[in-house]
Image: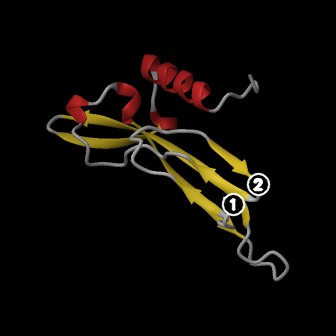
Amino acid sequence: ADTGAGLIVGHHAHVVQPVERVGDSLVAYGLGDFLGTALARLPWPARIGSIFVVDLSADPATRGAIAAYRMHFFMRLRAGSHERLAAAEALDGVLKQRFAARLEAIFPISGN
């Protein structure tokens, strides 16, 4: 961030981690896994992933600056001998509650 980067996206943590502003930079510390890691050996929190979407300004005065961002969360689920990605909004029951609790621990709404 100190060298002038506007966006820093970390990797290799295999779990979703916080996003924060560091000076003028937006830092996403970890987006989780998308696919590829052996699902059978993963503890359930590591099955949460995200897609990070960043909107850049096209306004001449702020061209290239981050105008907005959004994270789209998903869960990697077993589907027979395959794996499928389920959007967070599609989860239900106990899994939905556990998922929400995990995200609240990473991104506290209350500001604690």
Dividing the image into 4 quarters, which one contains the C terminus? top right
Task: Please tell me which residue is depicted at 24% across the width and 36% down the height of the picture.
Answer: 39
Mark 2 vs mark 1, foreground winner is 1
Callout 1, which amino acid? Asp
**Residue closer to the observer: 91 or 109:** 109
Q: With 72 as the anchor, is 65 left or right in this view?
A: right
Residue at the top extreme of this rendering:
94
Residue at image mark 1: 2
The correct choice, above or below, for 82 with respect to 56 in the image is above
What numbered label is drawn on residue 14?
none
Q: Identify the mark nearer the N-term, 2 or 1.
A: 1
Which element carries disc 1, helix, strand or loop? loop
Mark 2 element type: loop
Say whether residue 29 is left or right of residue 84: right
Crowding at dot 1, Cα within 10 Å, few <14 / some 14-19 / many 20+, comes out as few
Q: Looking at the image, which residue is at 30% across and 43% down?
A: 84
Q: How many tags in the picture?
A: 2
Q: Nearer the viewer, residue 112 or 81?
A: 112
* Amino acid type at image mark 2: Gly
Residue 4 image offset from top left, x and y in percent: 69, 67
Seen in the picture, residue 20 relative to 75 is either above or below; the reply is: below
Relative to residue 98, is residue 34 depicted above or below?
below
Q: Percent position (x, y) of residue 19?
A: 63, 44
**Drawn side of residue 87 relative to residue 27, left or right:** left
* Residue in the picture at 45% in, 30% down: 91
